[in-house]
Amino acid sequence: MSYAIKMILVMTLASALLRFLPFVVFSGDRPIPASLVRLGKTLPAAAMGMLVIYCLKDVAWSASPFGMPELIGCAFAVVSYRFSKNNLVSIFGATLIYLVIVNFIL
Amino acid sequence: MNPFSERLRGHTFRKTSPVLTGYFFLGIGFGILLKQIGYGLFECLLMSVLIFSGSMQYAAIGLLSAHVSLASAFLTTLMVNARYLFYALSLVDRYRTVDKKKKPYLIHAIVDEAYALIFENDSPVGVLNEDYWLAVSLYGHLYWIFSTLLGVVIGTLFSFQIKGIDFVMTALFVTIFTDQWMKNKDHLPALIGLAVPAAFLFLLGRDRFLVPAMLVLSLFCAFYKGREEK
């Protein structure tokens, strides 16, 4: 089995675990443990923060252009989403701005 | 062949049309990126059918091209998709009486967009709730499969290499992060989510920071009680 197929199966397994576990474990009257409820409430926001850092891990902050294209793109995504609440505008607007900066300006 | 009545199909199509717009562009973006890192229709189909998670599939682009270990891919998926656990927990009661043949698929298709529509539960008159839920889930899934495959085809036809196109991934996560920020009153989990990985990145370097960061974040989130219990 190739690396990619193994990876896809592992990611499938982990996703299925999250989706099915509550139905398998809490199908009766068994109460949901407090730590699991807390995880469900707080982990999604923390995980997104982690993914943002993960995406920015290869940025060279100490060399020109000092991560400015990434920061400008991210800033656009944050500000536009706060005002428009439209995720497509934010995602593709930020990408477009970034593409213009790295391909035509720098 | 078609299990849904005409009324249900029309109603579901109208309710899911915003989902279609979102999936269409995000799916094409994903397909193009997947093609760019050297994979094709087969991998795309497998991912969109089996994983069926936009944010995880985008994250997978990074993981696949970095050749991370299967164990860290497993951990990353648990983190990235942790919200499905939350959705599933809140659907346990609602799905209790659902037909056993439909239930596994309904659970497999738990995603942000379908969850929102199922929670709203605006099913048409004269239609079983569970059939409406099934239709919403299936339509969303098909839109996603179709859009991602279309992205791969577009990436194959125009084998352009656009410098920086993978920034769409960063923009996606920053946008979801902002959305979470606006929904939650307590911003500490989000801030810790930025600070802990950033600290480990600085200390351990970009190849080793992810797993320890995930472990610390999960422990924090499991024990963090919050400033206010809602």
Image: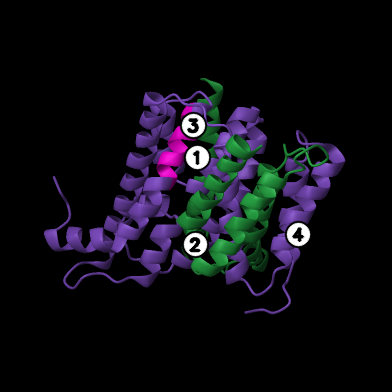
Of B184 and A81, the residue lying toward us: A81
Identify the colour of chain A in the image. Answer: green
Residue B177: give x, y in percent of width and height. 61, 58
Query: How far apart are the two marked residues, 1 and 3, measured between alpha carbons?
Result: 17 Å
Secondary structure category for the residue under label 4: helix
Query: How far apart are the two marked residues, 3 and 2, measured between alpha carbons?
Result: 28 Å
Q: On the image, numbered disc 3 is attached to which residue?
A: B34
Query: How far apart are the two marked residues, 4 and 1, measured between alpha carbons?
Result: 27 Å
Q: On the image, numbered disc 1 is attached to which residue?
A: A12
- Of circles 1 and 3, the one toward us is 3
Query: How far apart are the two marked residues, 3 and 4, measured between alpha carbons?
Result: 30 Å
Secondary structure category for the residue under label 1: helix
**Range of magenta residues:** B26-35
Residue furthest front in the image: A105
- Residue B66: give its label: none
Q: Amino acid at mark 1?
A: Thr
